Image: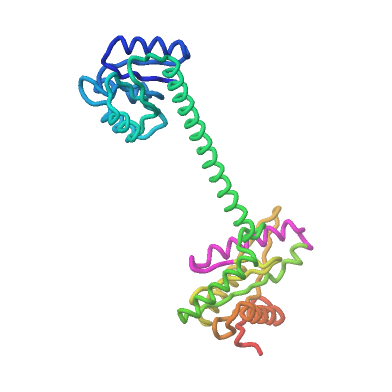
Amino acid sequence: MNILIIDDETYVGRFLLDFIGTIDPEIKVKVVERISDARKCFDEFNPDIILLDIHLPDGNGIDLLKELKGRGGRFEILMISGNASLEDAVQAIKYGAYDFLLKPFSDLGILEKSILRAIDSVNLKTQNELLMAQLAQKNIELEELNRKLHSLSISDDMTGLYNMRFMSEFMNKEILRAKRYNRNFSIILLDLDSLKSTNDRYGHLAGSSLIKSVANLLMGMVRKSDTVARFGGDEYLIFADELNYDSAKSVGERIRENIEKMQVIFEDNIITTTASVGVSCFPDDGSEFKELFARADAAMYYAKNNGKNRVCLAKDIK
């Protein structure tokens, strides 16, 4: 605890220095007689409590009170004066003085109580600042936890892609947007053709590695405006913004070709696969996500049942 005394009467400064020592010898006390000296030592000494005389050789204590309070901080200021008026007292309290004391200090009990109350006030402010800082940190941690929980709730554990829960909500919003602005988009649905055989031959860890590799491949191929999700197992969905049938088919073919060329190394084994791809387009194949998904799903299974490793458009199947 640091206390700064600003009073041009030397004997008052000495008296307060000794008196504060009787309250608590651990308190550090500094005495200055001029406002200019107070300004110089304020930042370095960093007082918790200031006993400030109103009438000083180089200025008015009320003006210094306003100046120091304007800086902000948890310190308290006790105004002291030997010939103050009621107006001075009112002004002091108005501008943030914690208390107003008259010299000479005829009742030392009042002086001691005022200093102790000021100390308690500073300590309370310090505790509040600490609690507020801790609360702010807890809020930051809570926000981060909520972000992580939200991310987990909308993400596929294995691949990090979006999951069905997210995609359903996302697609409903995109459909509303497309209707409002008269825009189109396509859904590209693909299913790996050989996951079961990979699991049977190399084990489920190999199958998981294959699923992750395809996810990474897709994320590296789509545009920023596209969205990729995994629908469990070995099925993936791509929302291709503002793509008509022709453009979506080209994208589907490029994805199919890259999956066919892809090689996954697992425990010294080279794993390959192919994919069957189905494409539906908004608004041609439906105005709701359920319809569009069903049409893309039917096209995908048509591709799988007719040779696999191919792209089929919903409009081309009956």
The residues colored magenta run: 200-228
> Is 51 left, or right, of 285 in this rendering?
left
Q: Residue at x 39, y 15 (%)?
A: 29
Q: Residue at x 50, y 78 (%)?
A: 178
134 versus 236 height, above or below: above
Q: Position of residue 78 (x, y in %)?
A: 37, 24
Q: Position of residue 68 (x, y in %)?
A: 32, 31
Name the dominant secondary structure of the magenta segment. Answer: helix
Q: Residue at x 79, y 63 (%)?
A: 200
**155 or 96: nearer the eye?**
96
284 versus 240 height, above or below: below
Image quarter of the N terminus: top left
Q: Quadrant of residue 17?
A: top left
Q: Quadrant of residue 252?
A: bottom right
Q: Residue at x 21, y 19 (%)?
A: 57
Quick one: which residue is furthest to the right in this view? 200
Q: Is residue 205 magenta?
A: yes
**34 or 170: nearer the eye?**
34
